[in-house]
Amino acid sequence: MKINCIVIDDEFPAIEQIEEYISRIPFLNLLKSFDNAIDPINYLKSNQVDLIFLDIEMEGFTGLQLIKTLQHKPKIILTTAYDKYAIEAFDLNVTDYLLKPISFERFIKAIDKVYDSFEISGNNSGNEPVYKRDYFFVKTEFRMQRVDFDDILFIEGMNEYLRINTTKEKIMTLQNFKSLQESLPKDNFIRVHKSYMVAINKIESIEKNRIKIGEKLIPISSTYKEAFFLMLNKN
């Protein structure tokens, strides 16, 4: 799936930053950038735009005024240096409100909101299939790193850190199991021990309360045993 987006901001450095962030997200497709809120009006009438990154305070015609002119509103993420418009913005049903300077981590959270709520019409019959992400981002060292769900073998707790063991590499992240589990598909990932979470589809065998994934033997604790075997029966 591709989400077509445009950027509207009257400051060139701000446009450059959002464009650079967009370039890092595989499913975002940047159509065009504008340095004012007037020119996009006709563009939006003749082009399929799914998402707008929109500044608020622009000379002549503001971002909020633009929103009010739109009959069919795409998803809108406001990008602004001012927090005083937050209440009015959410009355206009924007998806998120990003305060400049915008970090990439905060940008990712806003994009996740868009993706989670996004539906695309499959045909004229009115069927609207929902598209789900097949990856997520974790914070590791000084960057946000993409991790594909299908690459994950198991996740191991290591004191204050989690180590995500994948088919490609091992990734350390300063998160807890609860927050990480919320980002993972519930039908394939399950906690089996206070220190381990596994990918069901990567299990090779189970014997004597131990799970074999590759060369790793992972214990199943009594706390998680019942829920784990119930999940196996569902799969």
Image (cartoon, rainbow, N blue to C red):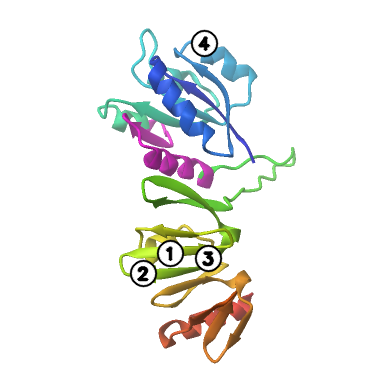
Q: Which mark is residue 163?
A: 1
**Quarter containing the C terminus:** bottom right
Answer whether labels 1 and 4 touch (C-beta < 8 Å). no
Residue marked by disc 3: 186
Q: Secondary structure at mark 4?
A: loop
Query: Marks 2/1: CA distance?
Result: 7 Å
**Residue 14 lies in the magenta stretch:** no
Q: Secondary structure at mark 3?
A: loop
The relative height of residue 89 versus residue 198 in the rendered view (above or below) is above
Left or right: residue 101 versus residue 136 is: left
Mark found first going from the N terminus, 3 or 4 = 4
| Amino acid type at image mark 3 | Lys
Give the magenta range.
90-116
Q: Secondary structure at mark 2?
A: strand
The relative height of residue 143 versus residue 59 in the rendered view (above or below) is below
Q: Which mark is residue 158?
A: 2
Residue occupying the point 38% across, 28% down: 79
Query: Marks 2/4: CA distance?
Result: 53 Å
Residue 104 image point, x, y percent? 40, 38
**Residue 113 lies in the magenta stretch:** yes
Residue occupying the point 59% across, 62% down: 167
Mark found first going from the N terminus, 1 or 4 = 4
Query: Marks 1/4: CA distance?
Result: 48 Å
